[in-house]
Image: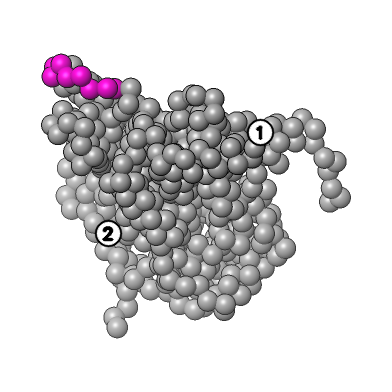
Amino acid sequence: MADPILAFEDLTLGYDRHPAVHHLDGRIAPGTLLAIVGPNGGGKSTLLKGIAGRLAPLSGRIINTFPHMAYMPQVGDLSRDFPVTVFDLALTGLCGRRGMFGRISRSERDRAIETIGLVGLSGFEQRSIRTLSGGQLQRLLFARLMLQDAPLILLDEPFTAIDQRTIDDLLEIVARWHGEGRTILAVLHDLELVRHHFPDTLLLARDALGWGPTASVLTPDRLETARQMAEAFDRSAAECHRAA
Amino acid sequence: MLYDLLLAPFVEFPFMRRALVGGLAISLAAAPIGVFLMLRRMSLIGDAMAHAILPGAALGFLVGGLSLGMMTLGGLVAGFSVAIASGFVSRTTLVKEDMALAAFYLVSLALGVTLISASRSNLDLLALLFGSILALDDPTLILIVSVASATLVALALGYRGVVMECLDPGFAAGVTRFGWVFHFGFLTFVVLNLVAGFHALGTLLVVGIMMLPAGSARLWTDDVSTMIALAIPMAMIANLVGLLGSYHLGMASGPAIILVAGVIYGVSLALGPHGIVRRYFPQRHLEA
């Protein structure tokens, strides 16, 4: 089978006709471990939403031939007071594979227990999710994501509200995924972390200011340009006629 | 003595037996539906849907008279139209589901009332609103029991999907393209149960047997399947006690059933582990 493709063709994503990602072109090779960095409002989350199919492009297109993906949004739809245990929420990660009817086997249950342990939540299995702290919930969502076992993984600020020890554990898991040839896109703000753990970086401030090996992208003058991005939309912006 | 109190009414009067069978069947399906409505924070949606169904049933009456078929059909058409239209609007526009539903059911209600008053018929609106559980005939009982059976089978099959749609709709949409099937399928059974139930309890009170046991069960447990397992017998007890109470005290049966459900809710509210007493007289906290 041919390698799956994830590519952007003159992609513009945004809200109410205002672009958040503007005329993005590019292609993500399978097995890439890519950090997406940039200022607030630079279109990082919007790009992931677009890839996940939650937001239709204003123009251009996204080509995605990955059979399935796992997406961890920054702000999800999870209803936190829903009466469900840690174990059951983790198990929902299997539904991409098992569907809404398929039986979940003994070994899959064991794998779920093991995964809950990997994110440091052993002993929490039968706790209701409303008793978790913000960081613990984030780790649980990470466990669910791991159980999805997807070739394409989209992480939107996955390490927010998580303590350093757990970040180190989770980074190890990300590195392992990378080793297994999965394609990973992560929106991050900690540039030191990106420099240490992410071979490739996309610097996004509405336009792509740099895309390639991390060291060549995160240069002082590029970061300064990103800092200058005007965050507010121009209310009286004219229609964009930039050539494709 | 006990015989006179508990069994005689059902032994002596066939209409009481029918009312009991109908009520128990409605409880069996409506209570779990209510649990999911509550968990989706759609507790009032049942009420809105009931209002949407009323004009359809009234129209059916105008066309076919007091016929089970036409009134059921009218209720179903009105209910489904409103459910589908509001589901479509909330999934394609910025309008949230509650507003979308509010808009359609209000229009449906106004349309229905307009048609009824224009026709100057002698339609007994009160019977539509509050039902006539003591007058269930065979076809109506068969309808109620069929809907209850279908609901239980559907909920058993679709349990995972419905729970996931309640728990994390965004995630459900990501792992399956068919999340909307579970959502609309669920709404379908909400409408079916309301329509089947309104013959017995009326369009307004049927919501009571759906929601009150669900709300009561929530106060006792944190587990969804336990909640369902509690809500069903609670609804059944409300039916039984309500029927007996109305028989002995000479009250209207439908409201009596809902009142008993209300009492069960009140007791749960007070004494349940998630209720008021525990809130103000908490147990000592545990070791870390």
- For badge 2, the amino acid type reads Ile
Q: Is residue B230 above or below residue B60?
A: below
- What residue appears at the point 21 percent right and 32 percent down from the top-left corner? B66
- For badge 1, the amino acid type reads Val
- What residue appears at the point 57 percent right and 61 percent down from the top-left corner? A88
Task: Residue B249: tell me if it is visible.
Answer: yes
Point out the residue furthest to the bottom here. Answer: A1
Nearest the viewer among B281 and B65 is B65
Nearest the viewer among B55 and A198 is B55
Q: Is residue A62 above or below residue B231?
A: below
Chain letter of mark 1 equals B
Nearest the viewer among A82 and B247 is B247
Q: Residue A48 appears at what percent x and percent y?
A: 39, 54
Q: Residues within 10 Å of mark 1 (few under 14, many from 20)?
A: some
Please tell me if label 1 and label 2 are on a single chain. no
Secondary structure beneath label 2: strand
**Residue topped by disc 2:** A62
* Magenta stretch bounds: B118-125
- What residue appears at the point 29 percent right and 83 percent down from the top-left corner? A1
**Residue topped by disc 1:** B267
Query: Would you say residue B218 sits in the magenta stretch?
Result: no
Residue B153 is left or right of residue B38, and the answer is: left
Q: Residue B168 appears at what percent x and percent y?
A: 47, 51
Give the dominant element type of the magenta stretch: helix, strand or loop.
loop
Residue A147 is left or right of residue A203, and the answer is: right
Q: Residue B17 appears at what percent x and percent y?
A: 44, 43
Mark 1 or mark 2, whichever is nearer to me:
1
Residue A176 is left or right of residue B108, and the answer is: right
